Amino acid sequence: MVAVIYLSVAVAIAGAFCLALGSALQERDAVRAPGRGVARVGFLVHLAQRPRWLIGTVAAGAGATLHLIALSGAPLTIIQPIGVTGLLFAIVLSAAFNRLRVRRSQIAAGVAVMVGLVGVLWVFPHGQDAPVMTSTTALVLAGTVMGVGLLIYLCAHWVPPGLRALLLAGAGGTALGTTSGLARVVASQTVADVTAVFSLLTLLAVALALFGGLLMQNAYRTGHFAAAYAMLLIADPITGVGIGAVLLGEGLPGTPAAQVLAVVFAAVAIVGTAVLARAKTRNPEAVRRFGTVRPATPSTPSVQENPHDDTAQRPSLPPREPSGPGR
């Protein structure tokens, strides 16, 4: 039994690395793809034709598969913390690919996200009963998630890149977490009836997965990869936990102390993610391509900020009239 747990831990570490590697590879092509800072749906078609992005997708899929295999041989309380260590892998890999130095503040923020996320998952109960969800509930859930995500997607162009990465990744992670919740219900029903896979819930899960993928690739496109990946790691499992607690009858933390702990751990994870979003290690290609352009207003022209040039784009002052006796 102990040997099985050790093997599952090794598989979970490999899965976390593969998932981080795949996402870091995807970021490279997401930043370089043509289009505006917030790309349209055809953006995914372009990415699907890039070999490196496809390799990244395969690696990410392999990581998710290895994580599920690890869960089959060891408890969730052991495997889930190992899974979120992928954030540290992602920070290091992204920095290496972009030839940037990993800062201590990034590592500290990554650890804070991991501790907060593991804490939230630890205090929530994990039910073992077969989940059940009606088609009406699934439609309302999917419609709400896609509606909010679409609003964020349409407004993201007007938001600074750091905040844009968090909003898009939060919406994308929520969509992917909802996909997991629906897939869990479908998988449970398929055990009793194989034809259950051909259902409305399956169609909704596929649609949400594609929508979540579009949002995540646009989050990577901002160049704030570590922040986007951290938000994905937070939003995805917490959405799954929330669906389980509210819609699948798994319940909330049972005691006031556990509820307070859940809030504290969530705050720690959010603070760590905010620090990553503010880190000055943005992908340099994203800075060159998209900068930090703010929308123009009638009174102030649109200006592309350059953090290394504090004299650029300063308004010129009218020449002063000569003064003194010679005037």
Image (cartoon, rainbow, N blue to C red):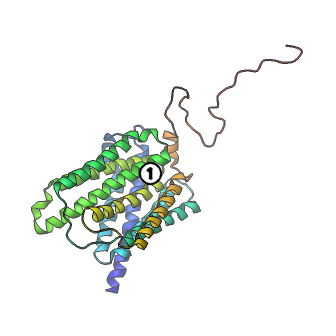
Q: Is residue 280 above or below residue 195?
A: above
Residue visible at 37% across and 39% down? 154
Residue 66 lies, with reference to residue 137, above or below; the image says below
On the image, the x and y values in percent for residue 22 come to 38, 58
Q: Nearer the viewer, residue 269 or 85?
A: 269
Q: How many numbered badges does the structure rendering display?
A: 1
**Quarter of the figure that contains the N terminus:** bottom left
> Please, what is the three-letter code of the amino acid marked with disc 1?
Leu
The residue at the far top in this view is 327
The image position of residue 61, as x and y in percent, is 31, 60
In the depicted view, which residue is nearer to us: 227 or 52? 227
> With 196 as the anchor, is 303 left or right in this view?
right
Residue that protrudes farthest toward the bottom in the picture: 1
Report helix, strand or loop for mark 1.
helix
Q: Nearer the viewer, residue 137 or 235?
A: 137
Q: Residues within 10 Å of mark 1 (few under 14, many from 20)?
A: many
Figure quadrant of residue 65 = bottom left
Residue 202: in sight, yes or no? no
Q: For the C terminus, which image quadrant?
A: top right
Q: Nearer the viewer, residue 65 or 120?
A: 120
Say whether residue 292 is visible: yes
Query: Looking at the image, which residue is at 81% across and 18% down?
Result: 322
Residue with the mark numbered 1 = 166
